[in-house]
Image: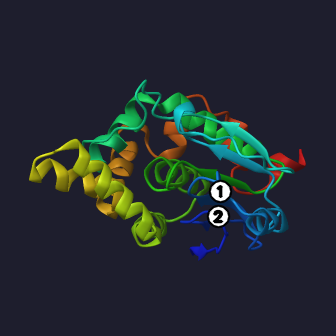
Amino acid sequence: MADILDLPGTFNTRVAGTRADGRPWLLRSAHLDRLQTSGHRRLLHLGVTTVVDLRDPSERLSPRLPGLEVHHVPLYQFPDGPPQTGTLPEICSFLLNERGGAIAEAAQTVDEAPGPALVHCAIGKDRTGLVTALLRRASGDALPAVLKDYALSAGQLPEEHHRTVLATLTRRGLDEQDHRSAFAVHTTSPNDALAATLQTVETLYGGASGYLRHHGMSEEALITLGTGAAACS
């Protein structure tokens, strides 16, 4: 269902969730720090009213986005910024187990938005991928479609991002195995990593709705998620 969007000034942008009538309720992207005027206009034309920024304060430039209400819901909350090492399953597991309250807050914010909401982090891959996956599963979207959407991100990352990651890792002097693992964390989006995380959600909470409910999302929000009913109430 992914509707790739050309949004000048950012990348990895697409419609992630649509209502029964085909209108979008959830979009996702990389950061909006360099969003161009035409990209900003495109968001407004799509009816987007709300932006949920999952980055930590040290990552943000706080661009001006007139007409859009920006909510900051940092997920990593590390003093030194986002993790530079580890594996994607480890990162997803950490977020799932340690940042449930923030994830539920982000989801509640999306539901309460008066119009479509856009969720983003730095490159729109892992933090954004997990939050949008939980939102979509809680709204009733099928697992294969959700996993396919997550896997799309790797192909949407610009070459500039790959070069930056490579240069950063080279400066750190990692051994070959750690270098390869770290590069994969920053440039790939294999759906098996997300699939394992969502399976954990099913096992421990009975599904995405149970996870979000357990961590503080209201029952009313879970009922109206993806329908637009919350904005009309």
Q: Residue at x 27, y 57 (%)?
A: 184
Q: Residue at x 61, y 63 (%)?
A: 10
Q: Earlier in the sequence, mark 2 or mark 1?
A: 2
Measured from the top left, where is residue 27 in percent x and y? 65, 60
Quadrant of the snapshot with the N terminus: bottom right
Q: Is residue 193 left or right of residue 178?
A: right
Measured from the top left, where is residue 84 in percent x and y? 31, 41
Label ID, residue 9? 2
Q: Is residue 6 left or right of residue 200?
A: right
Q: Residue at x 47, y 70 (%)?
A: 156
Q: Using the image as rendered, state which of residue 175 and residue 53 is in the foreground.
A: 175
Q: Inspect the image, locate mark 2, and give the three-letter code of the amino acid beneath it.
A: Gly
Say whether residue 54 is visible: yes
Q: Using the image as rendered, state which of residue 189 and residue 24 is in the foreground.
A: 189
Say whether residue 214 is visible: no
Which image quadrant for residue 103? Answer: top right
Q: Using the image as rendered, state which of residue 159 and residue 102 is in the foreground.
A: 159
Q: Inspect the image, locate mark 1, and give the three-letter code of the amino acid beneath it.
A: Arg
Neighbor class of circle 2 (other Cα within 10 Å; few <14, some 14-19, many 20+) is: some
Label 1: which residue? 34
Q: Is residue 220 left or right of residue 56?
A: right
Q: Are marks 2 and 1 in contact (CB under 8 Å)?
A: yes
Vertical position of residue 221 compared to residue 3: above or below: above
Q: Secondary structure at mark 1?
A: loop
